[in-house]
């Protein structure tokens, strides 16, 4: 293989490769796929400094977590939310303080883990740390992502429609969580039957 330019002339700075002598026994597509997959798995995921610190704090197996989320049959909006949460691109900086406890600057750690109001509304432990902590099983990841999604939906509802009393907040969280969980589990059961 040699580097060439657009005109197929040999060039050390060219962006293209030319195969001068094809192999006598070309590799099968399966062998090529395995080689590419092995190469991708040998490289680290490109993470920002903040992501790397967060994942290190929770001892997160990033590849397993990302694969688990990718394999879940989630609605596109929930999947998009999941990637934005993991890539720290939810725009919390647009809000001066937490809309629930009104005590601190808003960030994903406070909002999904340490906010006292959200903690009292949820029946489970800290959702964000539950998502990031291994093991990253399908059921645990699914339930945690749906819970985080419900918190996010409650946040957007209160941002646009005004604050709700705690009993209404609790009902909204329970309704969103149960509806989405039942729909996603139904999609998984139909997929399991057809495959």
Image (spheres, helix red, strand yellow):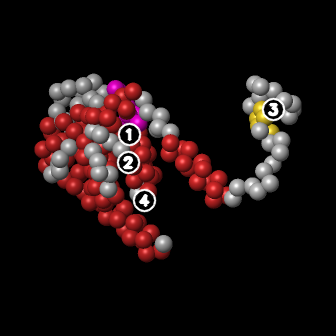
Q: Which callout, 2 or 3, points at the residue further toward the start of the chain?
A: 3
Which residue is located at x 43 percent, y 51 percent?
A: 67
The span from disc 1 to disc 2 (Cα, nearest Å) is 10 Å
Image point 54% across, 44% down: which residue?
40
| N-term-proximal mark, 2 vs 4 | 2
Counting every numbered tag in the picture gives: 4
Which of pointers 1 and 2 indicates the residue nearer the eye? Answer: 2
CA–CA distance between discs 4 and 1? 18 Å
Residue at which label 1 appears:
86
Query: Can you identify the residue that label 3 sits on?
Result: 4
Q: Is residue 1 above or below residue 187?
A: above
Q: Are marks 1 and 2 in contact (CB under 8 Å)?
A: yes
The residue mark sitting in front, 1 or 3, is 3
Query: Cα distance, mark 2 to mark 3?
Result: 40 Å
Identify the residue under disc 2: 65
Q: Nearer the viewer, mark 4 or mark 3?
A: 3
Secondary structure under tag 2 reads helix
């Amino acid at each position: 293989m040699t580097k060439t330019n657009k005109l197929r002339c040999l060039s050390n700075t060219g962006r293209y490769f030319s195969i001068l002598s094809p192999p006598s026994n070309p590799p099968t597509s399966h062998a090529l796929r395995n080689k590419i997959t092995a190469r991708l798995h040998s490289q680290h995921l490109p993470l920002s400094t903040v992501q790397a610190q967060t994942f290190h704090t929770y001892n997160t197996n990033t590849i397993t977590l990302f694969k688990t989320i990718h394999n879940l049959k989630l609605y596109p909006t929930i999947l998009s939310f999941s990637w934005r949460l993991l890539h720290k691109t939810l725009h919390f900086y647009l809000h001066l303080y937490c809309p629930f406890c009104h005590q601190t600057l808003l960030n994903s750690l406070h909002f999904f883990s340490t906010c006292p109001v959200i903690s009292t509304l949820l029946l489970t432990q800290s959702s964000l740390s539950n998502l990031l902590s291994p093991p990253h099983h399908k059921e645990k990841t699914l339930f945690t992502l749906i819970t985080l999604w419900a918190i996010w939906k409650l946040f957007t509802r209160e941002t646009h429609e005004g604050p709700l009393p705690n009993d209404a907040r609790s009902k909204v969280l329970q309704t969103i969580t149960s509806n989405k969980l039942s729909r996603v589990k139904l999609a998984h059961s139909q997929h399991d039957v057809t495959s």
